Amino acid sequence: MASLKKAHASSGSSHSKAAKFKRYLPLYLMFLPGAIYLLINNYIPMAGIIVAFKKYNARLGIWKSPFCGLANFEFLFASSDAWTITRNTLLYNLAFIVLNTVVGIIFAIFICDTFNKKLKKIYQSAILFPYLMSAVILGYIVYAFLSQSTGIVNNSILSALGKDAVNWYAEPKYWPFILIFVNTWKGVGYGCLIYISTINGIDPSLYEAASLDGATKWKQIKYITLPSILPSVITLTLLNIGRIFYSDFGLFYQVTQNSGQLYATTNVIDTYVYRALLQSGNIGMASAAGFYQSIVGFICVLAANLVVRKLSPENAMF
C-alpha cells in the first residue's frame, strides 16, 4: 500500500514538472537566444584568461606559448605610475557612481512629477540621448567648448568676463571636474529611466493617503518614493561597483584628446594599458591587466553585497 502511494506521488510529481515545463516553454525559447549569445560572447572567451600567464608568441599560438607565471602582472605594480593610475581609476569611478545615482534620482522624481505626458516623454528622450552618443562625438563636443583658439568658453564666456584664455588641454588641474561633469551629463540618463519606471510602479494610493494626512511633497518623497526605489538603487550600485576598476576608455582617451600634459589627472588603468600595448605590443600584459580588473571587481561586488546583506537582507542581490 505504501509503495503504491509512493509510486502515485512520484508519477504525479513528474506529471506536474512536465506540465510546468510545457507552461513555461515559450519563456525558455525566448531566453535561449540570449543564453547562446552570453555563452559565445562572455563565457567561451574566458579560456583566453590563460594568456595573462603566458609569454605570448603569435607564431606559437596561445597554447604553445611558454608560461611566465605572474611576470605579466609586474608591469602594473612595478611601474612608477601604478599608484597614480589606481588612484585615478578608483576616485573617478566613486565620483561617477555617487553623482550619477543622486542626479538620476533627482531627475527621475522631477520628470515623474510632470503632469504633461508629452513633456514627460520629451524629457525622458532628452536625458537618454547623451548616453547613446559615441565617445568620438562627445570628444568633439567638449573640444568645441574648450579649444584654446575657437572654443566657446574662451571666446564667448571668459572674454566677456575680461579673463585670459585658458589652454584647457595643458592644464590638468581642471580635468577632474570636467570629466566628472561630462560623465554625469552622458551617463545619468540610463539610471534615471530605471528609477522612473520604478517610481511609476509605486501604488498611487500611497501618495493619496499621505496627501490626505497632510504630508508635504518632501515627506512623500522621503517616506514613500525613496524607500520604494531603494532596491533599484542598490542593484545598480552593486553592478557599478563590479566595474569600479574599469573606466570609460572613450571618456579618458577621446575627450582629453590623449594630451600627454593631462596624464597626471586623466591616466587610468585602461588608458595606461592601451598605451603600453601600443608601445610594447605585449598582449600578455594587457590580458593580465584585464584579469586583475575582473578579479578585483568581483571581490568588490562580493564585499558590497555582504555589507548590504548585513544592513538590509531583503535588498541583497544574493
Image (spheres, helix red, strand yellow):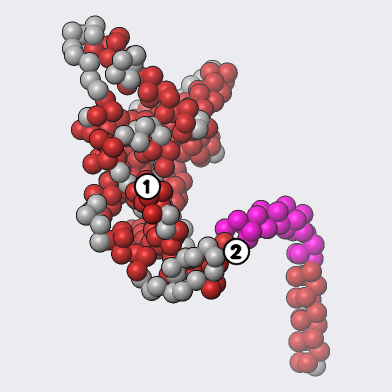
Q: How dense is the environment of label 2, judged by Cα within 10 Å: few (below 14), some, or many (20 and up)?
A: few
Give the quarter of the figure containing the N terminus: bottom right
User: Secondary structure of the magenta portion, mostly?
Assistant: helix
Q: Is residue 160 above or below residue 149?
A: above
Task: Point out residue 245 in the picture as x, y percentages from the top left corner.
Answer: 36, 53
In front: label 2 or label 1: 1
Task: Name the residue carrying label 1.
Answer: 275
Say which of 269 and 304 sits in front.
269
Taking the magenta stretch, the answer to whether it contains residue 181 is no
Q: Image quarter for residue 267?
A: top left
- Mark 2–mark 1 Cα distance, whole angstroms, equals 27 Å
Identity, as a three-letter code, of the amino acid under mark 2:
Ile
Q: Secondary structure at mark 2?
A: helix
Say if residue 203 shows up in the picture: no
In this view of the protein, which residue sits in the foreground, 62 or 306?
A: 62
**Which numbered disc flags the more N-terminal residue, 2 or 1?**
2
Residue range (magenta): 19-44
Q: Which residue does the image show at 65% across and 55% down from the upper left?
A: 37
Residue at 27% from the left image edge and 46% from the top image edge: 88
Q: Nearer the viewer, residue 143 or 58?
A: 58
Kindly identify which residue carries mark 2.
44
Q: Nearer the viewer, residue 58 or 146?
A: 58
Please state which amino acid type lies under the numbered disc 1.
Arg
User: Tag 1's secondary structure?
Assistant: helix
Q: Quadrant of residue 214?
A: top left
Residue 253 at least partly seen: yes
Give coordinates of residue 112: x percent, y percent.
Answer: 48, 28
In screen coordinates, is 99 left or right of 286?
left
